[in-house]
Amino acid sequence: MGAGRVGVTLAEALEERGHSVGIIDQNPDAFRRLSADFEGRRVTGLGFDRDALVQAGIEEARAFAAVSSGDNSNIIAARVVRETFGVTDVVARIYDPRRAEVYQRFGITTVATVRWTADQVLRRMIPRGADSEFTDASGRIQLCEMDSHAAWVGRSIRDVQRVSRARVAYLTRLGEGYIPAPDDLLQENDVIHMLVETPRVNDVQRVLAVRPPAEEE
């Protein structure tokens, strides 16, 4: 939803990766930003209108990004897509970071404009595993952003470290960095950044990508 610079960048990036894409905008002239070889659906209408969403292919969609210029339109569209059509991978762009916590309660991942990049939104739409953010001079240690299974929500940082045998460096929570204590619990939509020995990066990601073991009594 939204054929501005952000929406067009996302649509073309997704299509380049082999995905079928539909893009919605209420201004038909906005589609001129798309490259001439873009093959996705172009739907003129409101992004929270059910008919427009259906025309764009929402009933078969894996993911949805609401990246128009209006916070209210983005969150309404995101909620309609999640609650009416059952799409779970939903991202909403926001301009007012103070609203992020409210949106998160609806189960909508939000990306604040001031911190926005196409890669961040794509990552939340289509998780792709560990993403190295820093490697030390020797190449032995990496700081990695890790995808995690939803069942880790509510488990402690201590549990994450014990099971993965790696160190949680910090979390991204509601768009901001946060250094947790060992007894802090993971919350929905937290992004985990871990310090990992380079040979173990894939092992740690495999541990976090599945349900954690049952908690000990």
Image (cartoon, helix red, strand yellow):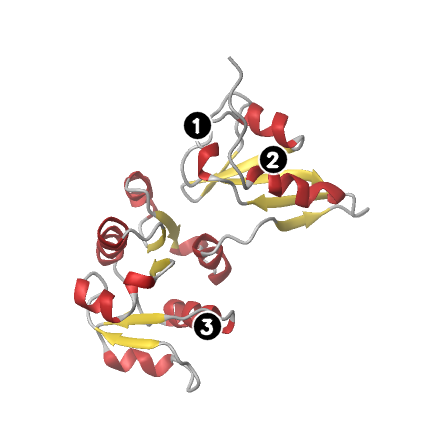
**Mark 2 Cα shell of 10 Å, populated few (<14), some (14-19), many (≥20):** some
- Horizontal and vertical percent position of residue 187: 42, 33
Per the model, the C-alpha gap separating discs 3 and 2 is 34 Å
Question: Residue 152: percent from the left, percent from the top?
Answer: 48, 33
Q: Secondary structure at mark 2?
A: strand
Query: The disc labelled 3 sits on which kind of residue?
Result: Glu
Q: Which residue is mark 1?
A: 154
Which residue is tagged 2? 169
Tell how many labels: 3
> Where does residue 12 sit, x and y in percent of width and height?
45, 73
Tell me how far mark 3 sits from mark 1, CA to CA: 35 Å
Residue 7 falls in image quadrant: bottom left
The reply to whether discs 2 and 1 touch (Cβ–Cβ < 8 Å) is no
The image's mark for residue 171 is none
Q: Nearer the viewer, mark 3 or mark 2?
A: 3
Q: Earlier in the sequence, mark 2 or mark 1?
A: 1
> Type of residue at label 1?
Gly
Instruction: Quarter of the image for the N terminus: give it.
Output: bottom left
Camera-side residue of 56 and 176 = 56
Q: For the point 78% across and 48% down, which residue is it? A: 139
Q: Amino acid at mark 2?
A: Ala
Looking at this view, is 19 or 44 the one in front? Answer: 19
Q: Which labelled disc corresponds to residue 15?
A: 3
Element under disc 1: loop
